[in-house]
Amino acid sequence: MISTNLLHYVNRFCDLKVLVIGDAMLDHYLRGPSDRLCREAPVPIVDVTTDIATGGGAANTAINVESLGARVNFLSVVGDDGAGRQLKQSLQEHNIATRSLILQRSRRTLSKHRIVANGQLLVRFDRGTGTPISQRTEAELICHLDKLFVWSDAVIISDYGYGVLTPRVISKLAELQARAPRLLVVDAKRPELYRDVGVSAVKPNYGEAIRLLEIQAEADSAARVQQIQSYGDEILSRTGAQIAAVTLDYEGALILERDRPPYRTYAQPHPDSRAAGAGDTFTSTLTLSLAAGAHTPAAAEIASGAAAIVVAKDGTTACSATELRGYLHADEKFVTDHQALKEQLLFHRHQEKRIVFTNGCFDILHRGHITYLNQAKAQGDILIVGLNSDDSVRRLKGDSRPINCLEDRAQVLSAMSCVDYVVPFSEDTPLRLIELVRPDIFVKGGDYTRDDLPEAPLVEGLGGAVRLLPYLDDFSTSGIIERIRESDGRRPSEWSPTADGHQNGHGRGSAVNGRGARPSAADGMQSAPTGGERSVVGRQRPFKP
């Protein structure tokens, strides 16, 4: 699948060295609840409970590069003030060296301050110097640039137009790029300033693209896509880039490349308040993917995945390599690689999702299973189904089972939207799989008690909980098989499995559990949830297999 191929490039990020140069900012968030208005004016009073300051602008780009696993050098300018010291501290907390963070005492560090009440952004106010850096600072920055450029595999220019990227600095970049070309990606408010630098890729947003083209904005989303697509050659010509990735917010991104058809990525809708820094993440990931050898559409898909991760978070945040691997794995529901599963689970736990686990044979999926699995999913956020292997089913149910092979059973389960992952296991009980998954909630169906479940001590020891759910009355795989046999006019003993374990309706065999195992909701859902709590949802009587 495509995600497996994309992971190859993500795994190469750690071999890359990247220089980020641009306008460093401090992003400051004050958050808290608000339930009353101020007497002086009809404005809300916010009781601040969290005060967070982190790197923004080019600093956020550098933080993303480091979080994704590459080595990074960050070249920028700050003032001798509190915001500058906070920014330096934030960079150091993300393991980014600050030796190339140049101090200009006459400048005020750029900072953006946001006040958020009950999750709603109320106001943003900005501070800092936005005029060009001094000639002395410029000379010092060019000296650093001379040394760091040749060290790098890729260079990212993050130019917000606040004075760090002066004409002399841009001219120096062009000189260095002509002498020893690097993958050079520009994210700038005015990308046309870099037309003669030898740019590999530019990443304007929609507003920057229409300003570049000197055309009117379209209000309709579909019209925006067609508009940018029709001007693809012009965007590449005016920026001098080989590739242009025009980000379109809710509409994803349109990737333009010389002598190739446009390629579009798609995005999930998100609140505008969560879009802060997503462009920096996209640029960082696109750069690393291209430097790792990905072709342009693949690099764009990886970058879109990283951006999707950060817009699901609050504030200005970064995407980690672990999160990105988990995201790229997410479209593969049938997971046989336990390391891949661990990465997916880590991704979901970073998103503060509750992991639900259940297990069974699920041989012939029926309404009882569907109701049970939907109820299981409702206990948390991510539902993982442990699925017995064919040999495991035979040991539990007898030689005539399973009716459907493992791959077929997994495909049917994967088609259910309530199921997030299907993981096979070959043992009679899923103890080893539980140790790997470490579920928050372990679900079992039927009239079990905690004492009936051998997995209970393990799940509880791992901090999980057991919840027992009812079955629908008169629904079971065994019952369905018996009704089919009766309608066929033959006794159960006249049925036998084929060589691969599938029922063929001839010979000897039995569908009953040859080992006398207790029937269960998933028709072979041997012991299940474990945990300190027992809750029964609904009032249906248990159905019998």
Image: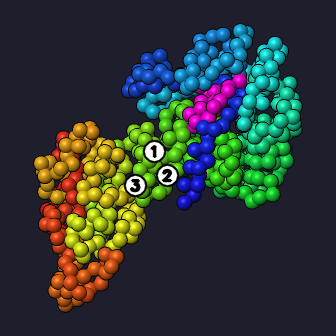
The amino acid sitting under disc 2 is His
Q: What range is drawn magenta here?
A: 54-75
SS under mark 3: loop
Placement of the N terminus among the 4 image quadrants: bottom right
**For residue 20, above or below residue 11:** above
The amino acid sitting under disc 1 is Glu
SS under mark 1: helix
SS under mark 2: helix
| Label disc, if present, on residue 329 of the rendered structure | 2
Residue 128 visible? The answer is: no
Tell me the mark number nearer the camera, choosing from 3 and 2: 2
| Label disc, if present, on residue 343 of the rendered structure | 1
Residue 65 in the magenta stretch? The answer is yes
| Image-based side of 275 in relation to 517, left or right | right
Residue 62: x, y in percent?
63, 30
| Image-based side of 169 in relation to 512, left or right | right
